[in-house]
Amino acid sequence: MSSAEQQAKAAAEQFREKHQLGVQPLGDLVALIEQTTGHDVAVLDAMPDAHGLTMRDPARGRVFIGVARTPHPMRQRSTLAHELAHVVFDDQIEDLAVRGWEETRADAFARHLLIPLGGLEAVLDDGDHANEGVLSAVVQRYLVSPAMAAIALRDVGAISQATVDVWRSLSTRHLATRFGWSDFYATLQEDSNRLRAPQALVSRAVAGYAAGVLSAQAVATLRGVPVDTVVAELAEIGIIPQSVDAEDFEIDELPQIDLDLSDLEEGGASS
Amino acid sequence: MNNMIAAIESARMAAGLSQRALADRTGISQATLSRILSGERAAKMPEVILISDALGCTVSQLTGSAVADRVTCAARSVNGADMDAMRQRLLHFMEIDAYLDDHAIPAA
């Protein structure tokens, strides 16, 4: 086992333990990441190859995680878990186009987080030789790609590397269709292909709108919806912007302004 | 594409506005807006303010800011994909977040 793999496994186990996730399959990863890390996650329109990006503002300690919307739900989950790894390991990468060691470690973290070997062993029958039906059940249970499920099955000794190499090329759609869960898969696809605004930021933007410091258009652009929709929705629940009126301020409450006008005087004289 | 054009285009897409709709909202003529967005002509400050207002982003996001200079990124992509669209969107979130900090709007 490489050290990237070891670090990833330990960190994934630690993460599950810290947040009391046991060895169960994980549900909605966007909400899980938002709730466990306090960082915002957004599902965005992006180029097909741009899977995920984590942006950090070191001055304010804020982190935003973006992933691309896609009709491939398992890939999106793996990207989300991968981005979570960058947060957990505090990775900062200069060149976005080059895949370094951190990327390998983040991939391994994603696998160990999404499909914990301890949990997988418990659901497999002892000494069972896994067939494609078992692979399908594992993919459906943990919502991971067949390739990721196959590696985990190998790591618990259920299949050989040769079988991994064969199964790696199977698609989730193939398994879902063959084993009768294509309806469920279609639901997952709809979910992963939908835009999602960063929840905490939108909530805070609504507070800013109510306080009169942020425009309705700003809220609309954050969410990616028309401004009329935002105004109507917020008015419906009784949120209308407070006007910041000049008459609200008493003149003696305004801060003292210390203006140095000496340059003006001298400038006038010397030039 | 310079940073300002990339930021404008990203916010324009997110706001779902055509170039024509943006011209209408800002009162900047379509011809002028088109020249600004193609990089032929630099936007003047009053135009930048009108555009940022119409797109719901901060002026500093368009003119370049301390936030944009200090953020760091980690990414997952294949084939060295161009991450710029996603980067612009996240930068927009950062700018609005910093703006709300400046106006003392508490975290939700």
Image: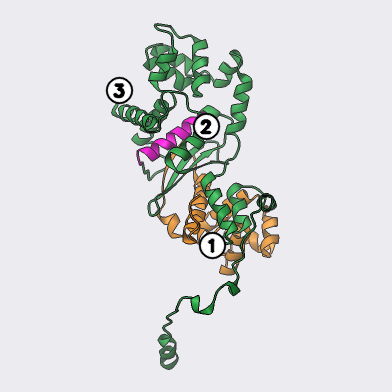
Chain colours: A green, B orange
Are the residues flagged by discs 3 and 2 in contact, CB closer than 8 Å?
Answer: no
Residue A200 in percent (x, y) is at: 51, 46
Tag shown at residue A1: 3
Q: CA distance from mark 3 to mark 2?
A: 30 Å
Task: Name the mark nearer the viewer: 2 or 1.
Answer: 2
Quadrant, the N terminus of chain A: top left
Task: Specify whether residue A205 is in view.
Answer: yes
Q: Chain of mark 3?
A: A
| Residue A167 in the image: above or below residue A33 | above
- The residue pinned by badge 2 equals A28
Residue B30 lies in what quarter of the image?
bottom right
Q: Nearer the viewer, mark 3 or mark 2?
A: 2
- A33 left or right, relative to B21: left
Instruction: Report, in whole angstroms, how far the alpha carbon at label 1 lies from the one at label 3.
Output: 51 Å
Q: Residue at (44%, 87%) from the top-left corner?
A: A264
Residue B32: image x %, image y %?
65, 64
Residues at discs 2 and 1 both on one chain: no
The quarter in which the C terminus of chain A is drawn is bottom left
Who's the residue at 55% across and 29% down the image? A73
Calculate the distance from the C-alpha at mark 2 to the C-alpha at mark 1.
35 Å
Which one is in front, A138 or A212? A212
Q: Is residue A136 above or below residue B71?
A: above
Magenta region: A75-90
Instruction: From the viewer's perspective, tell me whether residue A23 is left or right of residue A211.
Output: left
**Residue under numbered circle 1:** B59
**Does B84 sit above or below residue A181?**
below
Res B38 visible: no
Q: Position of residue A87 (x, y in %)?
A: 39, 40
Based on the picture, tell me whether residue A115 belongs to the magenta stretch: no
The chain containing the residue under callout 1 comes to B
